[in-house]
Amino acid sequence: MAVQLQAPTHLPPVAGVRLAVTAAAIRYPNRNDLTLLELAPGTQVAALFTRNRFRAAPVQIALEHLAQGDEIRALLINTGNANAGTGAAGLQTARESCRVLAEALGCAPQQVLPFSTGVIGEVLDLGAKVRAALPELLGGLAPHHWLPAADAIRTTDTVAKGAYRQVEIHGQTVTITGIAKGSGMIRPDLATMLAFVATDAQLPAALLQAILRQASESSFNRITVDGDTSTNDAVVLLATGQVAHPPLREGDSAFHGLAMAITAVCRELAQAIVRDGEGATKFIPIRVQGGRTGAECLQVAYRMAHSPLIKTAFFAADPNWGRLLAAIGAAGIEDLDVSRVQIHLGGLSIVRDGARDPGYQEEAGQQVMAKAEIPVLVDLGRGAAAEEIWTCDLSHEYVRINAEYRS
Amino acid sequence: MAVQLQAPTHLPPVAGVRLAVTAAAIRYPNRNDLTLLELAPGTQVAALFTRNRFRAAPVQIALEHLAQGDEIRALLINTGNANAGTGAAGLQTARESCRVLAEALGCAPQQVLPFSTGVIGEVLDLGAKVRAALPELLGGLAPHHWLPAADAIRTTDTVAKGAYRQVEIHGQTVTITGIAKGSGMIRPDLATMLAFVATDAQLPAALLQAILRQASESSFNRITVDGDTSTNDAVVLLATGQVAHPPLREGDSAFHGLAMAITAVCRELAQAIVRDGEGATKFIPIRVQGGRTGAECLQVAYRMAHSPLIKTAFFAADPNWGRLLAAIGAAGIEDLDVSRVQIHLGGLSIVRDGARDPGYQEEAGQQVMAKAEIPVLVDLGRGAAAEEIWTCDLSHEYVRINAEYRS
């Protein structure tokens, strides 16, 4: 029941990246649960990981491998098991899975990055699963397998998520293609769920990491489904450098165009995660402006986005603006002058100068709330800062999914 | 569907307090929605109010009246309308309701404190409603009407809430009786929902306020249903001084005994609110110990208590401890050493040294989770501070109530 979101029907290949998926029976049989991205020599990799203190084993191993500085040649992604809260046994099996794959690819273990998502706290023998799957994985590698990969990395996602852009760099077309998974436990903290974005442009590692930080800040770091930050979040940006264009320099317009396109792909993927939020029936962009700082705008926006009362009112299509007002007042801005607060819902003025807008009609509010996409605009009336985040509603389906998941 | 909670069947009178309830048709007909507490001369009053920046009109007026320092002679409580987000019209009608009642009681308007709870953002003519209800209200005043008052102040509460203690002060028995309402929009911030606690002991105003602060800190300020802080929260402690006992002094054992009894009444009322949390099927005390400061223990406890994933797992009776672990790791303690974290669920060791306890059996976890009351104990392993809070689960019923409420 994703909100105005359909699975992608076309994701263009990125020169230098080949993909394969297979069913390795990690948790369930006959389900594609293992995905391989093989990267051409010379590919630059930037990555961000969850700030949760309980980092899953694959996150710890990926960080360890990146720290060694060798060229990354493969990403290995499994669903069905998060390999988190699994202690030393989890680290060992994550290492083993990289070693097995590296041997088959003819590279070193530290040139493989592992990613896992699924149930927390169960130890699995990932090394053995990968070994058994090697023939299918290596035999299936192809540049045009982005769609099956988007499908194979799903867990509670109801819809596969992918996005792409193509831009010109000094007359050469470069492609940016990305895929992501995520539906619950979504409140990225300086990182995200699983997302993999690749371009065939040439970007040195430092620029790549800078672009990724900036793009994530206005995409994956601006979404929340349930306020819960996962132990396994990771976002990876790859640049294979296979398109021959003149070198890019920070600040020139081609660089700017490429960074914008990468950000656009990240935003589309991030919003897709919210549109497919567990049980979501509404997509809700929340913009808070007129703050003194961006931080206080975000504070107010997240307070609203995490309020179960507000989320259930959106589910019920009930313009219960009193709940918005209560959340804004409780967001922790001690010197907020409530008489300067304005609230718009889908373009409709609801609260003027801190109280119900005298011109507001309940029927008009209900019309706005009946839509699938309901933008909330709050003006704090105390400064020039503004921030926007995206969230979804809280439905019966959310409770059902999370009361039943794990079995 | 309150969790192991029944309405009180006996609440003893407090000398110096008379109560009355009546149906004033504030939102619905034939429902007791107006409550009066008349206080004997000499009664001391202490009160705490919501820290939400959007304070309802009655909260603003109550603070204004208390600031004038005159003796308080009456509390006037209505349900059906919170008189919040109502601007100047709301302030005016709250003032008018005090004036009408004061005139009938023969006191000044600033000797009346108004309290409102119910829907936010709708202006009502409270003055007219109170005027029409005066004969019934004044005619119905009696010392033994605590039970009907507990009933009349309910909104989405499924069960009336009351508690009492009787203690000896130098051979004299004094009574402490309290009532409260609250079920949703519960995350008090240095104040609480509506609670009224009275004693016939003699307590000077300064001591009374000190006791109330301390008692609230370990009762109303330790509960959360949904993380939403109301615009109308208020807790009031009354001391009528009608029992003739020697003066109390801070630090003597009789004072300590009285303060403990008042705290016990406050805790019982606070826990009753959580047990009757909207849609609650489980009562969950969360204790976090081994922290460096109480603040960081509370940070971890509330992060767990506000996680929809954890709350739905409790609803499903699913020992999904991975969600507990993820919430602890995301609670913002940057230097948390996860290998020192222990988690117990209902006395059962679930996580040892940051990973699944090797001795943990899923069946044992399921047995614990099947109970109506499930204590969570987290040891952070980094200090001597400890804190406890109380919360409930998130059920289908919660979504239903909040998707349907207001109509």
Image (cartoon, coloured by chain):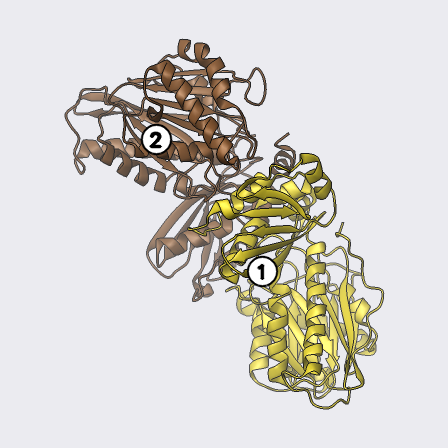
Chain colours: A brown, B yellow
Callouts 1 and 2 on one subunit: no
Regarding residue B164, the answer to whether it shows in the image is: yes
Regarding residue A349, the answer to whether it shows in the image is: no
Label 1: chain letter = B
Q: Residue at coordinates 82% horizontally, 78% vertically from top-left?
A: B143
Give the residue at mark 1: B387
Residue A39 horizontal/vertical position (percent): 31, 20
Q: Nearer the viewer, residue A6 or A39?
A: A39
Judged left or right of residue B158, residue B378 is left
Residue A364 horizontal/vertical position (percent): 54, 47
Q: Nearer the viewer, residue B16 or B118?
A: B16
Residue B263 horizontal/vertical position (percent): 68, 71
**Secondary structure state at the residue bearing disc 1:** strand
Label 2: chain letter = A
Judged left or right of residue A230, residue B231 is right
Task: Tell me how far mark 1 sits from mark 2, CA to CA.
Answer: 39 Å
Name the amino acid type tagged 1. Answer: Glu
Residue A25 horizontal/vertical position (percent): 55, 18
Q: Which mark is residue B322?
A: none
Name the amino acid type tagged 2. Answer: His
Q: Answer above or below: position of A183 versus B310.
A: above
Q: Locate residue B43: give its quadrant.
A: bottom right
Give the residue at mark 2: A65
